[in-house]
Image: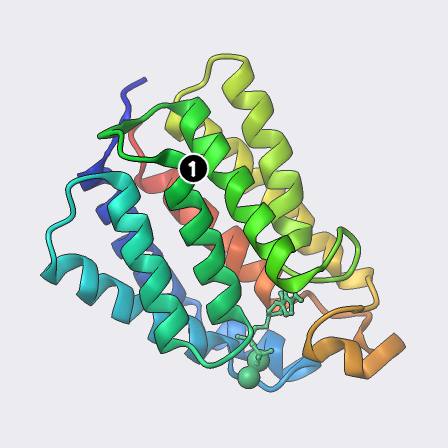
Amino acid sequence: MGGCSTRDVIAAVRAGSEAVTEHRDELVRLDREIGDADHGENMERGFRAAVSQVESAPSETPGAVLKLVATTLISSVGGASGPLYGTAFLRAASAVGDVTELDGTAVAAALQAGMEGVTARGKAVVGDKTMIDALSPAVDAAKSAAGSGHGPSGVLAAAAEAAHTGARNTEELVARKGRASYLGERSAGHVDPGARSTALLLGTFAETTGV
Ligand code: ADP
Ligand code: MG
Ligand code: MG
């Protein structure tokens, strides 16, 4: 149950970028149904830029990496998801401070802070059919896993599983925030793209973090 080092966080960001690229078409397809078909491109552009920043400027702490990802997402993604994910990473960075290794409790706290950032910025609540519907159950699961003594990989695995269920459950919801809300009742019957990308990222972070 090792801690999560700066190098682990960089590896997770790189793997997240690869996963987003791998699932680009799926994210585009989901966003085509209830949005403007750019979520795959937005995520790919943002995370590619983040990886190139993180690899070119050596960061000394997990928090510094998270902060660099945040500012890069905010400046490189035009869609709603850029500032929202950017704010999540920024709050996560503040939550972890300048420690050099994250334990399970720190990872759970970072996820919670990230979700609070998305909420502060986008004002969505659970049930509005947004990334919050993946993040909120993920945070609950992460806190409970950390509370029962799990390290970063166990905490992220619990978060990822809950996020996947949360994302799947957005299918039946009617969107009340973001572009999909323009469709009203017609937004039901499709998984929310941002909830899907949140589950995808958390799943990837869980796979890359320790054993
Ligand atoms: P845009 O809608 O500007 O084209 P994206 O397609 O990249 O941006 O991202 C859309 C996703 O952003 C949605 O699927 C949803 O999960 C998320 N989203 C949009 N508005 C909000 C909000 N107010 N709060 C939380 N998440 C939101
Ligand atoms: Mg879009
Ligand atoms: Mg757009």
Taking the spot 51% from the left edge, 47% from the top edge, the residue there is 114
Question: Where's residue 66, x and y in %?
Answer: 32, 49
**Could you tell me the amino acid type at mark 1?**
Ala
- Pointer 1 residue: 95
- What count of labels does the image hold? 1
Image quadrant in which the C terminus is located:
top left
The answer to whether residue 59 is left or right of residue 46 is left
Residue lying furthest right? 185
Q: Measuring from the top left, give residue 139's x and y in whole percent.
A: 59, 37
The relative height of residue 157 versus residue 68 in the rendered view (above or below) is above
Assess mark 1: CB under 8 A from ligand 1? no
Is residue 192 visible to us here? yes
Query: Is 163 in front, or is 23?
Result: 163
Q: Residue at x 61, y 74 (%)?
A: 30
Ligand 2 sits in quadrant: bottom right
Give the side of residue 176 with respect to residue 154, left or right.
Answer: right
Above or below, 8 relative to 49: above
Depicted 37 relative to depicted 13: above or below: below
Task: Pick the quarter of the image with the N terminus.
Answer: top left
Label 1's element? Answer: helix
